[in-house]
Image: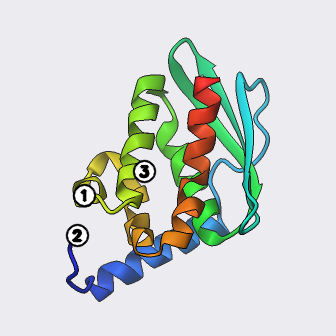
């Protein structure tokens, strides 16, 4: 794992991106005609998410969430729902695996452009107690798609 100090400008940019998704979440609300739905919470910190998907064939056409909790869990849900639109189920599950790898300190995953804005959450890996916050929406996704 790289232990060099992060670029302060990049860290500030990532922090602002996380706060932007927390303050102005994308795709937050109820999804009419959802084909998949799951609710998860983290009882240790109070984070919760209700994830709803509209899947057509093998493709996620729309993803929305309702939830509450810390900035990390809510920003992760907002970023995730943006990334999932028009992805196949196998692609979505592969992204979930990459996100999990990044949260567990995988440097290659943290540089993977496929994760898009979610790479802003790579620093969370340094705080083990917060990893569950960032992975909560992804756990909801995998539960919903494997049900």
Label 1: which residue?
111
Asked where in the image residue 22 lies, by quadrant, the reply is bottom right
Q: Position of residue 2 (x, y in %)?
A: 20, 74
Residue drawn at x 58%, y 67% as measured from the top left:
72
Neighbour tally class for label 3: few under 14, some 14-19, many 20 plus, Cα within 10 Å: many
Choose between 31 and 52: the one closer to the eye.
Answer: 52
State the residue at coordinates (45%, 33%).
93
Mark 1: few, some, or many residues within 10 Å (few <14, many ≥20)?
few
Point out residue 126 in the picture as x, y percentages from the top left corner. 40, 75
- Decide if residue 62 is in sight here: yes
Are there few (<14), some (14-19), or many (20+) residues within 10 Å of tag 2? few
In the structure shown, which secondary structural element does the residue marked by tag 2 occupy? loop
Image quadrant in which you'd find residue 122: bottom left
Residue located 41% across and 68% down the image = 125
Which numbered tag is attached to residue 100? 3
**Mark 1 or mark 3: which comes first in sequence?**
3
Residue matched to label 2: 1
- The numbered mark, 3 or 2, whose residue comes first in the sequence reads 2
Q: CA distance from mark 1 to mark 3?
A: 13 Å
């Amino acid at each position: 794992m790289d232990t060099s100090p992060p670029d302060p400008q990049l860290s500030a940019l990532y922090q602002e991106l996380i706060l932007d998704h927390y303050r102005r979440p994308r795709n937050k609300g109820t999804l009419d005609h959802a084909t998949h739905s799951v609710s998860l919470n983290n009882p240790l910190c109070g984070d919760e998410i209700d994830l709803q998907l509209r899947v057509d064939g093998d493709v996620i056409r729309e993803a929305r969430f309702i939830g509450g909790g810390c900035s990390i869990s809510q920003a992760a849900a907002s970023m995730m729902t943006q990334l999932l639109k028009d992805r196949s189920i196998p692609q979505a599950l592969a992204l979930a695996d990459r996100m999990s790898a990044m949260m567990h300190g995988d440097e290659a995953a943290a540089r993977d452009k496929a994760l898009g804005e979610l790479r802003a959450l790579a620093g969370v890996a340094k705080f083990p107690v917060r990893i569950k916050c960032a992975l909560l929406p992804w756990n909801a996704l995998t539960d919903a798609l494997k049900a």
